[in-house]
Image (spheres, rainbow, N blue to C red):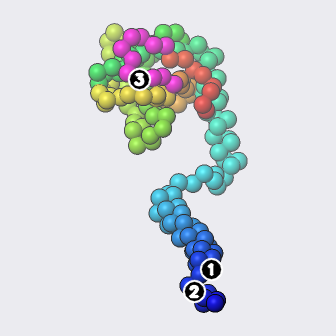
């Protein structure tokens, strides 16, 4: 004798598949709306390209002037000193610390020079991980940037490199 359709296995199995897909899609849509607050689309790519070219020009200017630094970053203290290309008059420098993966940890410091030619600043003591350190003068004529694993207790050289621009 034949059973009614609602007492058989296969109709319920076939109904369960699309319902499960609809539930999973609903969860994915909810998560993308509530958690996806970032945009990977650039509104004005031409303007962004011009900005990148300006940054490259600043790095090339630092290379022309042969500017490089020696620095340490350890135990809450950042020290910076010209290794080459030191100008006649030392001015204030802006140093940017950009974490490779966690934008919330990024910070910057304005450094003034001490009598011995060393720039010093306080930094977070828990500065662990891979960071991009960027140094610019107050007038933003040149730029020196390089990636390092911090903390650095020994002297490290900071040179103007074009990668990562």
Q: Secondary structure under badge 2?
A: helix
Please tell me whether residue 156 is drawn above or below residue 164 in the rendered image.
above
- For disc 1, the neighbor class at 10 Å (few under 14, some 14 to 19, many from 20) is few
Q: Which residues are magenta?
A: 147-157
**Which residue has dot 3 on it?**
150
Residue at 32 percent across and 12 percent down: it is 115
Q: SS at mark 1?
A: helix
- Front of the two marks 2 and 3: 2
Distance, label 2 to label 3, CA atoms, is 65 Å
- Spot occupied by residue 47 in the image (x, y as percentages of width and height): 66, 47
Instruction: Read off the residue under disc 2.
Output: 6
The residue carrying pointer 3 sits among few (fewer than 14), some (14 to 19) or many (20 or more) residues within 10 Å by Cα, namely some
Q: Are marks 2 and 3 in contact (CB under 8 Å)?
A: no
Q: Earlier in the sequence, mark 1 or mark 2?
A: 2
**Sequence-earlier tag: 2 or 3:** 2
Residue 150 falls within the magenta-colored stretch: yes
Residue 11 at x, y = what percent?
A: 62, 80
Specify the label residue 11 is tagged with. Answer: 1
Which quarter of the rendered picture does the N terminus lie within?
Answer: bottom right
Depth order, front residue of 23/75: 23
Quarter occupied by residue 60: top right
In the image: residue 133, left or right of residue 6:
left
């Amino acid at each position: 004798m034949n059973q009614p359709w609602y007492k058989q296995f296969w109709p319920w199995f076939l109904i369960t598949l699309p319902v499960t897909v609809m539930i999973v899609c609903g969860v994915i849509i909810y998560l993308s709306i509530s958690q996806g607050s970032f945009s990977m689309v650039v509104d004005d790519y031409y303007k962004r390209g011009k900005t990148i070219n300006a940054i490259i020009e600043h790095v090339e200017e630092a290379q022309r002037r042969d500017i490089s630094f020696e620095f340490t970053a350890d135990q809450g203290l950042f020290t910076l000193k010209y290794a080459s290309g030191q100008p006649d008059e030392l001015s204030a420098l802006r140093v940017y610390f950009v974490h490779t993966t966690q934008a919330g940890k990024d910070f910057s410091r304005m450094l003034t020079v001490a009598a011995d030619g060393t720039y010093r600043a306080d930094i977070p003591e828990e500065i662990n991980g891979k960071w991009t350190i960027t140094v610019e003068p107050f007038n933003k004529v040149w730029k020196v940037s390089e990636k390092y694993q911090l903390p650095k207790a020994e002297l490290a050289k900071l040179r103007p490199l074009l990668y990562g621009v």
